[in-house]
Amino acid sequence: MPKKDSFLRGRIKSIGFAIKGAWFLLKSEVSLQVQAIIAVLISIAGFYFNISPTEWILQTLTIALVISAEGFNTAIEELADFIQPNQDPKIGFIKDIAAGAVFFTAIAALIVACIIYIPKF
């Protein structure tokens, strides 16, 4: 029986897998690349407009929510394509729902950005 990793070693491995997955997403998903660029630009805007700590928290959480939703969407799409590589209306419906979730988070992010930045102009 193979030796089981210690708790700490297991957590370190988990972090490594997470970094690998994040890098894969950033490297391979065009929509996530666009969202990452927007996140960088909006963060630069945060420094430029000297937004408050509360605004930073909301902005950071919103960015994380959108990028996470995109990651979940990609995982669902990859899993669906693995399970059913052929065109299938049920799989298409599942993919559309996952994309819809990303859309909702992007709309929420736009609203948060408007609440934070419109008063700055």
Image (spheres, rainbow, N blue to C red):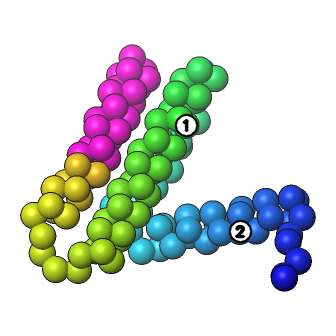
- Label 2: how many Cα within 10 Å (few below 14, some 14–19, many 20+): few
Q: Residue 96's spot in the image, x, y percent?
A: 19, 54
In-front residue for pair 72/104 = 72
Give the magenta-colored segment's residue range: 100-120
Residue at x-position 29% and y-position 68%: 80
Against 96, residue 4 (above or below) is below
Occupied quadrant, residue 92: bottom left
Q: Residue at x 56, y 68 (%)?
A: 21
The foreground one among 115 and 86 is 86
Q: Dot 2: what SS?
A: helix
Q: Residue at 39% x, 30% y: name it.
A: 113
Residue at image mark 2: 16
Q: Which residue is mark 1?
A: 60
Kindly report the secondary structure that dominates the magenta region of the rendered protein.
helix
Q: Position of residue 83 (x, y in %)?
A: 30, 74
Specify the amino acid type for callout 1.
Thr
**Residue 28 sits inside the magenta stretch:** no
Position of the C terminus by quadrant: top left
